[in-house]
Amino acid sequence: MHGQIELPKRDQVIVRDLAKPATIALGVGVVGLLATAGLGVAAGDEMLRFGHAMLIGILFFLSITLGALFFTLLQHVTSAGWSVVVRRIAEAMTAAFPVMGLLVLAFLVLPVLMGKPWTYDWADSAFVDGHELVKHKAGYLNAGFLLVRVLLYFAIWIGISRFFAGQSLAQDDDQDPNRTLKMQRRSGICLILFGVSLTFCCFDLMMSLNAEWFSTMYGVYFFAGCFWSFLATLALSSMWLEKRGQLKNVVTVEHYHDIGKLLFAFTFFWSYVAFSQFMLYWYADIPEETHWFHYRIWGSWTGASMLLLVGHFLIPFLGLLSRHVKRRRNVLAAWCVYCLVFHYVDLYWNVMPEMVNGQPGGNPAEVGPAFGLIEVTAMIGVGGLFAFAFLKRLDGKPALAIGDPRLSESLAFQNI
Amino acid sequence: MSESKSNEDLHGVVAYYDDVDSVMAAARRVRDAGYKKWDTYAPFPVHGIDEAMGTRPTILPWIVLGMGLTGMTVGLLLQWWTNAYQYVFMISGKPDWSLPANIPVTFELIILFSAYTAFFAMLGLNKLPHLSNPLHKLEKFGRITSDRFAICVQAADPNFDAARVRSILGAGSNDLEDCPADTSPNALPLWFHGNMALMTCLSFIPLAVAFKGRFATSEKPRYHVWPDMDWQRKRKTQTAWEWEAFDDGRTMRLPVEGTIARGELRDDFEFYYGVAQGTSVPDRVTYDAGTMGEVDGQQVYEWLQGFPAAVVVDEALLDRGRQRYGIYCSVCHGAQGNGLGAVALRANEIQAEQWGWIQPKALHTDNAKNYANGELFHIVSQGISSMKGYGAQIVPQDRWAIVAYVRALQATQALDAQSGDLPPGVEFEDVPTVDDFRISEADLGSSDRPEAR
């Protein structure tokens, strides 16, 4: 059947007419951010709720972007053929790094530089003075070094993503297989840089919410969520481009089957890592390690923790187990939406208890989840900017890497 | 009728193809013609061949799922049975049966059961290992492991008609041949049976040895399979070692004279030894349990009656004491202090007295109550009678916490339901004593292994 494969014509696969949706997304994003800021000021809690709602929104879309970068690198380092038809979508998503970087700098790093504990308690010098353990971490957890690190992370990510997306786009025109070899050669070292930067970024942006707590597995935990949410977004974006016509008869049920398999695998990987982190702390039972879990499991957050266990692990594990689920577009799409919802629940569960924790007299075990409008507007705000960057990059370019030497292999791909 | 006679000599009709497309097309034609007993042979996995052959989806995933769930059940039951039912033993203060601790083993058993099932059920469903096939006798058939494809329709198929099969297969192939049936005897040779019988017998030997060791007694010292693991050439702190040691035979240097290691300064006699400051300090060697530290009726040591000044007796200390007591003491002395911990019950059950086992003491006896606090502390630290000292495992502060908790145990167990000591609304229940578990002479006569009540 290799003889029957027809390579798609360049004209058929170019994505057109996305300039207007991109502009609308930008508008929606800016309005969402303004609304979030307004709600944050109106709350009158010294921007605490605003800081944490924005952090979840930023982490949600940053994790998808990071997952996209990992996917691109992974396909090159393993020299994978099946994924060529969907790799361009991942490359386009990595265009969101500059926007994400600006958001992180403006809403997370800038308050720390100003000494405002909107999101991070340790931004306040009075807090640090009152906490012996945090005082000893001041050499790492300080505003200046945080800025340097965040700039470094985004420099790495933007650099890597620009190289790989750029090579891939250039290959569309010249079909030079040497570009593929070049990308493969660099993908290994880039993956190492990616792993280290992601881990430390997760320590800085997420783990330092509770500056006294520490977990060396936290980066892996965050990474599992990154790739999981990205795979869901990838399948949905691919279905959308299929519907628009650019990927019609290009992406087949076989590719969705593979994306579904990865989604299933990372459902379990997330659970595996989450449990490994929990069990070591449970078993050793050392107060400085267990307190983070203690107020999540015993108190007002018990329900949320159980929801995460059942909703993030048991239900999708059983739901995505069957091959028939992965080979039906509509069913898989429903599971992808489900996964994205629970990725949000996961981040919410990680971030929100820390809003109360560290406040004078604040006990997260007594103050439970309080989901409100501000979390929704923060998601719309960050999501709008993410969509803007993604659509802008897709517009006017082929929806798949038509110059890749393994395109025909990918088009003919079949699961046995 | 001559057709059916020739079918008995015929295994099937084989057609060879040069490329994937023609073998796929031929497979579709055979499928549509309704044949059941036929197969396709290729040097590599051909994508889409199952659809072309009309192969039904395998039931292997369901078998694997079922066995995975079985593995989960076995894993959980195994841990529940061993930890919470058959031999209850407290480990680092955790509940007898706690799910988080069981997840790794359960997970591994799910993987083990699933992986083995996937592998062996795959072999079974494919009817492997299959040692002989008539097709192997065809010279041309050898090429399907390198660069050719083949389809063989078997004569055993109920719809088999040699002429029709040839026409169906022949459309994409100009190379057809008949495969003769394998007429060689299919009984296994005698040497095979002999070897199998011998190996089966031999395989019982390890089992028999293990069985004998389980039920027979022996005068000889036990056999050491790995002597270098049983007697390791390692040196522990301050043990003598005749070679590879310092000249004086020690394995470690003594501290410089006139110095003391950090944390080793024990100038507070009350806190570290349980005796009055400056008085003589007992150690395990000179302390004779039989005389309770008395020589000629004279008390040698000035035991501390209360608690050292460095120890504050409050609720936190008692809580700490209860926790430490639960971890270190309760396995023998029992959570209630009645001397009926898990170890003691088990020893009772197997009548360990016959091998010199000494029953752990109940802590509610007048004897135990009459010890001074300092003496109790000394017993926790250095041991008494057959009890080993716990000074190496438990820091002094925690040993005092245990002393305080033992005092609390003694006080609460002294309460009497009739005397009205109890606060209203508190249920009173007698603490079982060792006599409730004692095996009577009648029990001993009636059976070999009486169950503990």
Image (tube, rainbow, N blue to C red):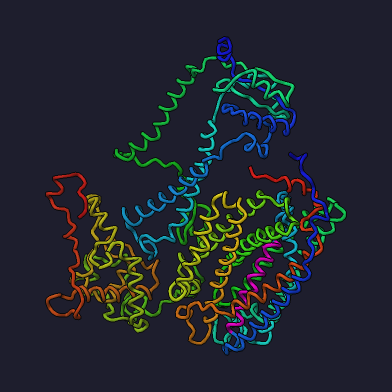
Q: Which of B374 and A235 is in front in this view?
A: A235
Q: Nearer the viewer, residue B151 or A152?
A: B151
> Is residue A381 left or right of A405 when viewed as pictured?
left
Does residue B27 sit above or below B13 in this rendering? below
Q: Can residue B260 be seen here?
A: no
> Is residue B387 left or right of B167 when viewed as pictured?
left
Quadrant location of the N terminus of chain A in the rendered image: top right
Q: Where is residue B151 in the image (x, y as percent from the top left)?
A: 65, 26
Does residue B46 sit above or below A341 in this rendering? above
Q: Characterize the magenta stretch by its predominant secondary structure.
A: helix
Q: Can residue A295 be seen here?
A: yes
Answer with the quarter of the image where residue B19 lies: top right
Query: Residue at position x 17%, y 80% from top?
Result: B421
Q: Nearer the viewer, residue B411 or B106?
A: B106
Quadrant location of the C terminus of chain A in the rendered image: top right
Does residue B157 sit above or below A49 in this rendering? above
Q: Where is residue B105 in the image (x, y as percent from the top left)?
A: 45, 53
How many badges with numbers are in the image? 0
Q: Which of A215 and A91 is in front in this view?
A: A91
Residue A63 belongs to magenta span: yes
> Is residue B379 left or right of A316 when viewed as pictured?
left
Does residue B15 sit above or below A208 in this rendering? above
Query: Residue at position x 81%, y 63% from top?
Result: A396
Residue range (magenta)? A48-69
Answer with the quarter of the image where residue B173 lies: top right
Query: Residue at position x 66%, y 70% from top?
Result: A61
Residue A106 belongs to magenta span: no
Q: Where is residue A166 in the image (x, y as percent from the top left)?
A: 82, 62
